[in-house]
Image (tube, rainbow, N blue to C red):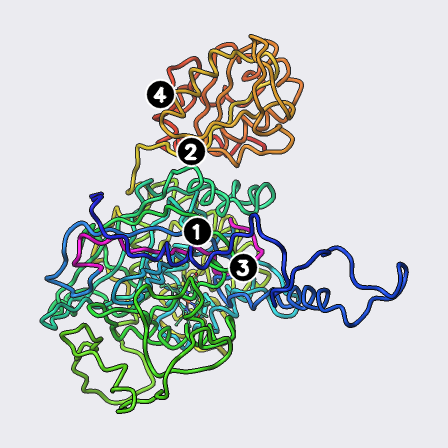
């Protein structure tokens, strides 16, 4: 759908104009005074005290003292990138939003991916939801799609959000654990709040440990509205579908990556864009006519429910490409301010009570985080169209407003800025009919908490189900209260009996027997805590294939990282042949050698080493290749980490390719456990290796692979 004729709507230029490049320039203070010494403070003599009059020192230190701003309460750790959104076909039947009707536009976007629970400096591979927030700089103003990589949320009403976050954050007495849900307060909350179970089982799945931000789906979660020029509304759910497919890693790798590279996802996104391998997602819409609002077995305003793709297909309507890394992390990724309430004409809200609460929260949080209601003037937050209104002043106002009038109506200012008439694109809210009593409560249509977690679990492959069971066992194994574990086993049992049995076995506990009784009676708990019973489980769909990670496949190995294990004397021709085949497919080949610097091939030629074995780990790569060359194999045998490297690659079900000449090394590994494994290729053509890397993992290997003791 690329069209060279498309209009470039200036955001990239706009931000560039605000970018200071110091090359060739003289250093000055912030007041413009030239500086000739930035290493020494002004002193009373060579060994004397520093002088208070040193305005250069004071300015430098004062600015430094205030460099940090409060990190986000949630989603503190993030990575951002610039890009562009292009529409495939006009959706004017559904919406009047220019971004969804004008196929000639290239709408600039800025995307920020994040984890939720951890602090800004926490590790990327925490088991967690990932934020997926997109700012569209449209010609009619900013539209923010502030979503996650999971299609549902933990709670149904904004009122409970502080409780959820307080429960998952580090426990307040000791401030541990960091960026981890595996602790008492979180499970105390989850086990008493069954509406969380759907999002929770997604967090127990591999979706919570993605291989890359570039290989995750994104979801707007809430049902929104699209409104067309005639004022007709359709309900809509937003999806992002990654063109590289959806892929995750194992928990064992996640734990090891925590130590090997805490910036694994951040680095991965940066390096891919830097290498010109631009990540792409298609925007998918599930569109539901207004009259179908009540046709489902669940409430479409309930954010803990997804609409299975088998019930309402996802139409792919456009493509987003991330094609530029930020110039400055703080100015862009840290200062970007998203808000689900930033919508443009043609997009509107529903009464989802979680969405309604969010509409308040995001501006409010920017006031304490960015310090002023003028945060929209920060370059990354500025719309590309002009803004005019009568709002004035406040901290850090950048705009120099001219004229006498800052009120409406006025005659002195010629009535300006004048109001937009509807025909000129003024925002008008959808005229939804409301006729109700004011209540503090919740619709009974929100009370089914078990059907969709059960649907999710049924829809997974065997290996994905095993990972879910392992994750529950790990997380609950970190809880110290038996009654919380029992309560969790009770609710897991409501979702799926086999799952509950596996988890109970792992914990060395029994599944509570009388699951037809209210939970407090079933687990013999003291009944001080409210015994809320969700509604009965329904089975309206046997399975939804779209819920499994295997659903979105990609044949591409672009940007996959392949380690070539070598020592001096490796077979240069074999390496060149394999490297050529892989790099032609845009994979990234790294020479991992027994030492740093350069390594010699069997023709005595020097090759630059990408990483010495000592400084890297197998978990940072997608596959491994071992070329022949007797001296090289001997060197690898003398570096026992090479054996661990291969064994770990096998354990994590990745592809391993080796030449016949590598047999002596392979004999020392666990390779003989996997006779007939399709992703272990000895002396085979590069094409076979490429196919197995594209398949991501050979999960069939998993039950045996778990026995490898690394
Ligand atoms: Fe957020 N959320 N949230 N959230 N959220 C924030 O806003 C909040 C919710 C999401 O990269 C905060 O600017 C409330 C759902 C993302 O900058 C804060 C409720 C979804 C990001 C806030 C929710 C999200 C945030 C913290 C319940 C998925 C990161 C800093 C009513 C659809 C955006 C900030 C970025 C950030 C509040 C629930 C996604 C405190 C009150 C549901 C991706 O305002």
Depth order, front residue of 114/637: 114
Q: As drawn, is 547 to the left or to the right of 511?
A: left
User: Tag 4, which secondary structure?
Assistant: helix
- Camera-side mark, 1 or 2: 2
Q: Are marks 1 and 2 in contact (CB under 8 Å)?
A: no
In the rendering, at what x and y percent does residue 528 appear? 50, 79
Give the mark nearest the N terminus, 2 or 4.
2
Q: Which mark is residue 208?
A: 1
Location of mark 2 (residue): 560
- Camera-side mark, 2 or 4: 2
| Whole-number angstrom distance, CA of label 4 to CA of label 1 | 30 Å
Q: Tell me the quadrant of ligand 1.
A: bottom left
On the question of residue 680 being in view, the answer is yes
Q: Are marks 2 and 3 in contact (CB under 8 Å)?
A: no
- Classify 652 as above or below 609: below
Q: Residue 340, located in which quarter of the rendered image?
A: bottom left
- Classify 474 as above or below 398: above
Magenta span? 99-124
- The residue located at (23%, 52%) in the rendering is 7
Depth order, front residue of 210/384: 384
Q: Residue 108, located in which quarter of the rendered image?
A: bottom left
Give the mark nearest the N terminus, 4 or 1.
1
* Other residues around mark 2 within 10 Å, as few (<14) / some (14–19) / many (≥20): many
In the rendering, at what x and y percent does residue 176 appear? 62, 62
Q: Is residue 106 magenta?
A: yes
User: Tag 3, which secondary structure?
Assistant: loop
| Whole-number angstrom distance, CA of label 2 to CA of label 4 | 15 Å
Location of mark 4 (residue): 688
* Other residues around mark 3 within 10 Å, as few (<14) / some (14–19) / many (≥20): many
Q: Ligand 1 near label 1 (Cβ, under 8 Å)? A: no
Depth order, front residue of 274/522: 274
């Amino acid at each position: 759908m690329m069209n060279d004729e498309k209009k470039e709507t200036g955001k990239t230029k706009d931000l560039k104009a605000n970018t200071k490049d110091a090359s060739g320039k003289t250093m000055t203070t912030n007041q413009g005074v030239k500086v000739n010494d930035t290493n020494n403070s002004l002193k009373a003599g060579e060994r004397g005290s520093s002088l208070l009059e040193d305005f250069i020192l004071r300015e430098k230190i004062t600015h430094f003292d205030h460099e940090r701003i409060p990190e986000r309460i949630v989603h503190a750790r993030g990575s951002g990138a610039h890009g562009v959104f292009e529409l495939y076909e006009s959706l004017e039947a559904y919406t009047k939003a220019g971004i969804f009707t004008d196929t000639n536009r290239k709408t600039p976007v800025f995307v920020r991916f994040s984890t939720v629970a951890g602090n800004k400096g926490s590790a990327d591979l925490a088991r967690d939801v990932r934020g997926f927030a997109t700012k569209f700089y449209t010609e009619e103003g900013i539209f923010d799609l502030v979503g996650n990589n999971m299609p549902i949320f933990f709670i149904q009403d904004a009122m409970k959000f502080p409780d959820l976050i307080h429960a998952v954050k580090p426990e307040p007495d000791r401030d541990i654990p960091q960026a981890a849900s595996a602790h008492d307060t979180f499970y105390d909350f989850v086990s008493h709040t069954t509406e969380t179970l759907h999002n929770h089982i997604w967090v127990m799945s591999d979706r919570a440990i993605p291989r890359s931000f570039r290989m995750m789906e994104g979801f707007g979660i809430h049902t929104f509205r699209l409104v067309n020029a005639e004022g007709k509304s359709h309900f809509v759910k937003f999806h992002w579908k990654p063109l590289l497919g959806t892929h995750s890693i194992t928990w064992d790798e996640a734990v090891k990556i925590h130590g090997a590279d805490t910036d694994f996802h951040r680095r991965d996104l940066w390096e891919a864009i830097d290498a010109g391998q631009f990540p792409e997602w298609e925007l998918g819409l599930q569109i539901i006519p207004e009259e179908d609002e009540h046709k489902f077995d669940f409430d479409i305003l309930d954010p803990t429910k997804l609409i299975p793709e088998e019930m309402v297909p996802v139409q792919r309507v456009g493509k987003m490409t991330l094609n530029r890394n930020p110039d400055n992390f703080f100015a862009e990724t840290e200062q970007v301010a998203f808000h689900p309430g930033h919508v443009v004409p043609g997009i509107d809200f529903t009464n989802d009570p979680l969405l309604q609460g969010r509409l308040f929260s995001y501006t409010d949080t920017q006031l304490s985080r960015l310090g002023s209601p003028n945060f929209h003037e920060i370059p990354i937050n500025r719309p590309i169209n002009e803004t005019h209104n009568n709002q004035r002043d406040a901290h850090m106002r950048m705009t120099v407003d001219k004229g006498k009038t800052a009120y409406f109506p006025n005659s002195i200012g010629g009535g300006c800025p004048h109001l937009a008439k509807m025909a000129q694109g003024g925002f008008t809210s959808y005229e939804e009919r409301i006729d109700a009593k004011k209540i503090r409560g919740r619709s009974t249509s929100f009370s089914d908490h078990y059907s969709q977690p059960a649907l999710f679990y049924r829809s997974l492959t065997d290996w994905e189900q095993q990972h879910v069971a392992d994750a529950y066992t790990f997380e609950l194994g970190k809880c110290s209260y038996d009654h919380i574990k029992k309560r969790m086993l009770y609710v897991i049992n409501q979702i799926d009996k086999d799952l509950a049995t596996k988890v109970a076995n792992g914990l060395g506990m029994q599944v509570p027997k009388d699951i037809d009784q209210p939970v407090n009676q079933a687990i013999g708990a003291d009944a001080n805590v409210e015994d809320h019973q969700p509604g009965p489980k329904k089975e309206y769909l046997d399975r939804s294939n779209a819920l499994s990670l295997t659903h979105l496949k990609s044949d591409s190995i672009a940007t996959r990282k392949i380690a070539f294990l070598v020592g001096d004397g490796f077979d240069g021709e074999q390496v060149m042949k394999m490297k050529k085949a892989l790099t032609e497919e845009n994979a990234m080949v790294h020479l991992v050698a027994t030492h740093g610097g350069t390594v010699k091939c069997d023709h005595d030629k020097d090759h630059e080493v990408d990483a010495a074995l000592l400084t890297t780990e197998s978990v940072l790569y997608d596959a491994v290749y071992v070329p022949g060359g007797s001296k090289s194999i001997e060197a690898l045998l003398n570096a026992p980490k090479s054996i661990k490297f291969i064994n770990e690659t096998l354990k994590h079900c990745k592809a391993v390719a080796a030449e016949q000449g590598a047999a002596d090394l392979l004999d020392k590994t666990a390779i003989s456990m996997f006779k007939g494994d399709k992703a272990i290729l000895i002396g085979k053509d590069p094409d076979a290796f490429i196919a197995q890397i594209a398949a991501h993992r050979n999960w069939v290997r998993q039950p045996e692979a778990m026995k490898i003791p690394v």
